Structures are given as structure tokens and as C-alpha cells.
Amino acid sequence: MKTILAPSLLAADFGKLGQEVREVAAAGAEFIHIDVMDGMFVPSISFGLPVIKSLRPFTDKVFDVHMMVEEPGRYAEAMKEAGADLVCVHQEACCHLDRTLHQIRDLGMKAGVAINPATPVSTLEWALEQVDLVLVMSVNPGFGGQKWIPYAKEKIRQVRERLCALGLEEQVRIEVDGGINQENVREAVEAGANVIVAGSAVFAGDRTANVKGFLKKFEMIEG
Ligand code: DX5
Ligand code: ZN
């Protein structure tokens, strides 16, 4: 699968989010990564569904919504209404993960499942056939601009192995999120990640140049 860049809006200028979305989309980002935080699952509060809805007219690119929220199933319908294409929920935040994943898919959205750095890949054993994407967190979620945790690579490898064993490697994407920049992205891609989230590495400085820089790296890695 071709590697996709998913700029995280958490690092964008909130005063001009629409323009920011337009710029990274025009530069070649396929996903727009949207971090929703509830102040419970993670310490911070970011933004919610009305903000996502207001951004929808700015692009046709995939809205990849990362729900750092306790029991995100409560918002499944509202996410659909706001224009989410892919909704990623945390394994740790869902008491009934299977139900939540089905709720998302039944509404016609793609479903993803995320795991925190300390959560083993084995907890997803029975979820892999119910998802379109697995998100391996390479920082503890809640804040942008952190340093990546290198053992995330081993977890990405494990996810890839399990997907291959199940014959799902062409259906289920592997996303990595946290502390990724143009210097370490090769390690994440070589481990098996094919959706790369980048916040500060895209929205600090020249956004267009940063997106193009990542895309060039992907081309080089893919040969
Ligand atoms: C962290 C968020 C990330 C974050 C990534 O809780 O899920 O998406 O914005 O930002 P960087 O790339 O700066 O680590
Ligand atoms: Zn995220």
C-alpha cells in the first residue's frame, strides 16, 4: 500500500484552520488527522464535532478523526454528521470495543482502533478483523510536539505480522502517531506503517514544503 501523510491539525493555527486544511491538502496530504480530546481520557481538551463540521467544506480529503475520548461510541452518529470518514477509537477507552467498531462501520464510516504505548498489540487479537486501520501511538497521547518512543517500531512490526498472518495486510492500514519527523519517518515506514501522522513536523514553518518533503521521503523509501 502506498504511504499516506496525515497532517495533525493539533499543531495548526486554530485561528485559520480552514486555510491550513486547504494548504496541506493542496500540497498532497491524503488524510487530515483530527485530534479530538475530552480532558478525561487525556488531560487536554482540543476541539469537538462542530469544528470538524465547519472544516468539511474546505476539502474532499479523508477526515481521519482520532478520538481521545472515553466511550467514543456515544458520539458515533454525531461524527458521521460532522463529516468524519474514518473514526479511530482507543482500545483503552472502549468497554465494548467490538460494539463501538460496528457502530462506526454501520454508519458507513471506516473504523480504526488505537493503542497507547504501554498497551500490548495482543489486546487487538479479536479486533483486527473488525477494523480498517490500526493506530500505534508513538507518544503518550494528549499533546503535540513530544519525542517519539522508539519501541513503537516493534509494535508496528507485530501488527504487520498479525495482519499478514490473517491475510489482511492489503485491507487494514497501519498508522503511526506522535513525534514523527522527516528524520525518523523511514524507521516507521520500514517497520510497516503506511499512514504517517505529523503535527509539528508539518505545521511549523512552510507547510507546503514540509508536506512535499515527507512525500519525497516516501517515494525514496518505496523506491
Ligand atoms: C497526540 C496526538 C497527535 C499529535 C501529533 O496526542 O494524537 O496526533 O498531534 O503531533 P506531533 O507530530 O507534533 O507529535
Ligand atoms: Zn492523533
Image (cartoon, rainbow, N blue to C red):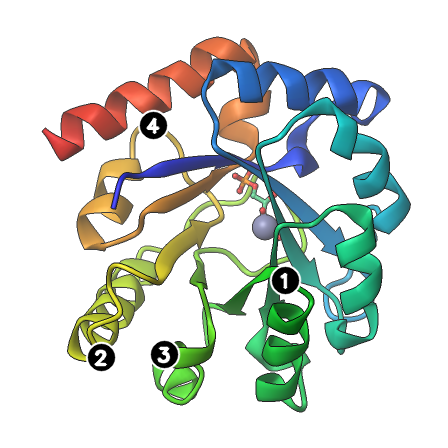
Q: Label 4, label 1: how many angstroms apart (C-alpha)?
A: 34 Å
Residue named by callout 2: 166
Q: How crowded is mark 4: few (under 14 residues within 10 Å), some or many (20 or more)?
A: some
User: Which one is in front, 193 or 119?
Assistant: 193
State yes or no: discs 3 and 1 in contact (Cβ < 8 Å): no
Residue at label 3? 121
Task: Calculate the distance from the C-alpha at mark 2 to the C-alpha at mark 3.
Answer: 15 Å
Q: Earlier in the sequence, mark 4 or mark 3?
A: 3
Q: Residue 108 shows which numbered tag?
A: 1
Quarter of the image holding residue 75? bottom right
Q: Is mark 4 on a helix, strand or loop?
A: loop
Q: In which quarter of the image is the C terminus?
A: top left
Seen in the picture, residue 171 relative to 200 is either above or below; the reply is below
In the rendered structure, which amino acid carries the disc numbered 2? Answer: Leu
User: How many other residues sit within 10 Å of disc 1, few (<14), some (14-19) or many (≥20)?
Assistant: few
Mark 2 to mark 4: distance in Å?
Answer: 31 Å
Tag 1 secondary structure: loop
Q: Residue at position x 29%, y 30% from top?
A: 183
Asked if 72 appears above or below 44 in the picture, the reply is below
Residue 153 horizontal side relative to residue 132, left or right: left
| Residue at screen point 59% across, 76% down | 101
| Quadrant of residue 132 within the rendered picture | bottom left
Residue drawn where x is 69% and y is 62% of the image:
68
| Res 48 visible | no
Residue 120 horizontal/vertical position (percent): 39, 81
- Tell me the residue that label 4 is attached to: 182
Check whether the beta carbons of the residues at disc 2 and disc 4 lie within 8 A of each other: no
